[in-house]
Amino acid sequence: MSNGNGDNQGVVTKDDGVVVLKNVVKKFGENVVLKDVSLAIEKGKTTVIIGPSGCGKTVLLKHLILLLRPTVGEVYFKGERIDEFNEHDLDKIRTNYGFLFQGGALFDSLSVAENVLFPVRQHYKITSKSGIDELVRTKLAMVGLDGFQNYYPGNLSGGQRKRVALARAIALNPEVILYDEPTTGLDPIRADIINELILKMQRGLGLTSVVVTHDMTSAYKIADRIIMLHEGKIYADGDAEHIRNHPNQIVQQFINGRVSDDDLEVLRMSGTISRSEFEPLDLEE
Ligand SMILES: Nc1ncnc2c1ncn2[C@@H]1O[C@H](COP(=O)(O)OP(=O)(O)OP(=O)(O)O)[C@@H](O)[C@H]1O
Ligand SMILES: [Mg+2]
């Protein structure tokens, strides 16, 4: 189905995707972050989520893995309703996911190898040293960092740290990987290495990916489908071409990084800045 702008419409059933959100509402106190989000994540595809800062992208991503529970609505994994599972049962479901958190935080006190192994140790009792060495080696090789096993995060560049975080995200051979801002803070070349790795995971291993990003170059390159979240709802939904040519002005302003007239008005109302306000301060110590 399609609305007037040609977007996919949010009518989903539990079997429409690997992960399905159905009529999800999320409130934090009075703050309604997700108003009524229905979304089916298609198997083997890369779904990219865009939208202004604070619009709820991370909150949406966390619902896909039940790190947050909906206030209202349902979440399904492979047709099974999981939002009412207890933490123990959810932990089992979560072994099907890899998650690259915003900021890609590694444990600074652990070596690269131990960082990659972290999710494995959480879920399994490790008995064979040679088995785990091989697991770490293959995962690091996939991100081009075999040989860095004994490094510590403090000795790696930002791009290398993201790649280690990606190796950690795939440590349990997940079917679904969730990436929260994987290219933020990287220069365009390093960002493109991450894009290539996301594509490699999807094309080479058939993984299902959901990527939250502000980076439209990245979005256009990796997405099978782009979803724009705005004011708690899915505002636009389609392939890269569709989003690029979207008729809605708010979508165009967002993807082209233009400030809206309303926002400009707020800036104008904040008054002018005079040079005298920037003189050295003469304060008593
Ligand atoms: N655990 C929480 N408790 C209360 N409020 C929260 C919580 N997590 C998120 N929020 C609120 O939900 C809203 C959406 O936050 P979210 O982190 O999803 O935004 P975002 O779109 O990911 O932004 P950014 O692009 O800056 O990462 C914000 O108003 C935030 O304050
Ligand atoms: Mg976020």
Image (tube, helix red, strand yellow):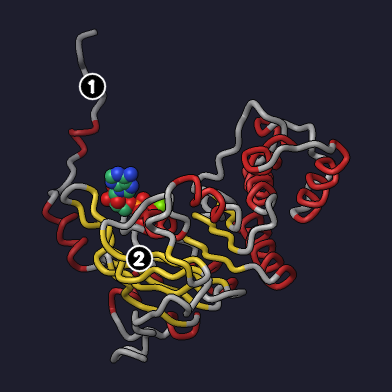
Q: Which residue is mark 1?
A: 281
Position of 107 relative to 21 (above/below): above
User: Would residue 2 be found to the left or right of residue 29 on screen?
Assistant: right
Q: Residue furthest right?
A: 130
Q: Which residue is mark 2?
A: 74
Q: Secondary structure at mark 1?
A: loop
Residue 169 makes an appearance in the image = yes
Neighbour tally class for label 2: few under 14, some 14-19, many 20 plus, Cα within 10 Å = many
Residue 53 makes an appearance in the image = no
**Residue located 68% across and 71% down the image:** 206
Amino acid on which the number 2 mark rests in the picture = Glu
User: Would residue 42 be found to the left or right of residue 3 on screen?
Assistant: right
**Splitting the image into 4 quarters, where does residue 33 fall?**
bottom left
Gap in angstroms between the C-alphas marked 1 and 2: 56 Å
- Nearer the camera: disc 1 or disc 2: 2
Q: Position of residue 147 (x, y in %)?
A: 84, 41
Quadrant of image for the N terminus:
bottom left
